[in-house]
Amino acid sequence: MKKLISILAILLFMAGCSSTTNTNQSEESQVSIPESLEAKLYGKVTDAGQVVYKMSIDLGEKISATDVDEETFTVHAVGSTEEILKGTEVESFGDYDLDRTIVKTEVDGQYIYIYFMQNEGATLAYLSAARNYPVDLSYTVTLNKDLTLDVDGEEAVLSDVVVNVDTTVIDEETSKFQSVLVEDGINYQFYEAADSDKLIVWFHGNGEGDYDSSNNNVAQMLGNRGTVAWASDEAQEIFGTAHVLAFQAPDTWYYAQSDNLLEKAYEEINEVVEKYGIDPSKIMVSGASAGGYMSTRMLIKYPDLFSVALINCPALDVATDRGGETPTDEELKSIAQSNTAIWLVQGDDDTVVKTDECTVRMFNHLIGDLETVEKEFKQDLDSNFITKETAKDGKYKLSLYETVIVEDKPMLEFKTDLDQDGKDELTQYSSHWSWIYTLRNNPKSTDDTDIWTWAASYLN
C-alpha cells in the first residue's frame, strides 16, 4: 500500500527578468526537477523487536543531493492498531504518533538515506490482551529547507515535491523466511538452508502468540530476534547451515496439553524432517519464557526428539495459573533419562518468572547428585554472569546473569547501538529478557566455549 505524502516547503523566487535569478530554470538551460519521488522503509529486528530504522528517498536517475543533513527533513510516523481493535475493549500500549528522531543522513548516487533512533518506530504494538500485533504504518515527510540538487551536472533547487512512501517494510533478515499456515495445526515461519540435514526449532514467548485467530504468523518473527537470529550469517556458519522452524502458538503455549499443541508440534516437526531430508539426530530446540515452558513440555513428552536444547527463563512456576501445568519434580527428573544436552539461561533475579522455581529448579533436578563446576564472567556493558555445569561431561549447564537495581527494579544490562553511530552504549531491559544473551551467542561454558558452538557440536 502506498500513501501519497505532500512535502511542505517554501518556494522562494527573486522577481526580475534576469536569467540568473531562477536556479530552477533559465533561458539558456531548462533543468528538469522531479515532480514526485519514491520513498521506502527499511526494518531491522532488534533485541526489543522490529523497528523502521531507515528510509530511502529516490531522486531519480542522474540526480543527486549535495546538502542533506539531519535538519533537512522532518519524518512523522504513525503506528496504529485502531482497525484491528475496533469494536473490542482491548487497548494498545504501543500505538504512536510522533516525529522520528533522525540520527544521520547519507547520499549515495540518486538515493538519500535517513537513519532513525532504534528505540522508536516499532512495527508491533503490545496489547492489553498480552499480545504483540502488527501496526498499520503511515509516514509523512516535511522538507524543512530548499534542497540543492545536481541534475545531470547542472545545479537546481528542490522546493516543492510529492513523495510516494511505500509502507511495506523491507527487512533482509525476515525476507529469508516463508510463512506456512497449517489448517487445524500450528502456523510457522520457515527458513530453508539449502541441502542442510539439521533443524533448529524456536518456541516464542507469550507476547508473540496469535491474537484473535488473525493468523498473522509474523509476531514471533518480529517480536525479538528469536526467529531471525538462527538464520543469521553467524549462526549458519557456526551450525554448518541449518533449517529454522519458528512456530506461532494459536493462542498461548500454556495450552500445550489442553489444546494438543505438543502433538501438533511433534507431527509438524516430523513432516519438515521428512520433507527436507533432515537427520532426526540433528534437531535442536530453543524457547523463551512461555516458549521455554513449551520446550520443557516437549522434552518431557518426546525425550528422544531433540539432541540439544537451549531454554531461556522457562515460565514453569506460572504455568498452572495461566492454563498450563507446572511440571512436577518427577517430570523434570525424567528428562535426565534422555540423551538431550541442555543449557538453561536466566537473570539471577527474574521478576516475571522466579529464577529459583524455573531454571535453578530444573537444573537441580537434571544434575541430581552429579558434581558441578562453575565460572564467573565479567563483561563490559553486558551483564556479568556465572555458568555452572556438570563436571564430568558438561551435558547440563546453567548461566545466570547478574541484574542491577534501577529505580527499585532489577534490570539486565546490554551493549547496544540504538543511535547507529557505531559506538557501543548501555541499555537496560527487563530482568526477564535473558533470551537476548542466548540469541546474541553470549553465554559461555567454563572452558569459554560459546553457547552456539556448544549446541552445534551435538548436531554434527
Image: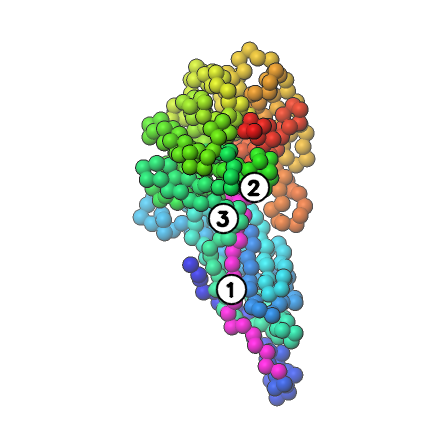
Say which quarter of the image contains residue 46.
Answer: top right
Q: Secondary structure at mark 1?
A: strand
User: How far apart in space, not on screen, are marks 2 and 1 (Cα)?
Assistant: 30 Å
The answer to whether marks 2 and 1 mark residues whose Cβ atoms lie closer than 8 Å is: no
Of residues 148 and 444, the one nearer the viewer is 444
> Can the viewer see residue 425 in this picture?
yes
Q: Which residue is mark 2?
A: 232
Q: Which numbered circle lies on residue 175?
A: 3
Where is residue 82 drawn, in percent x and y? 38, 51
Q: Which numbered circle lies on residue 38?
A: 1
Tell me the residue at 38%/31% (across/down).
267
As drawn, 152 above or below 58: below
Q: Does the magenta segment cover residue 50?
A: yes
- The span picked out in magenta is 29-52
Q: How is the image coloured?
A: rainbow
Tell me the residue at 52%/37% (across/down).
196
Mark nearer the viewer, 3 or 1: 3
Where is residue 312 drawn, in percent x and y? 52, 29
Mark 2 vs mark 1: which is more N-terminal? Answer: 1
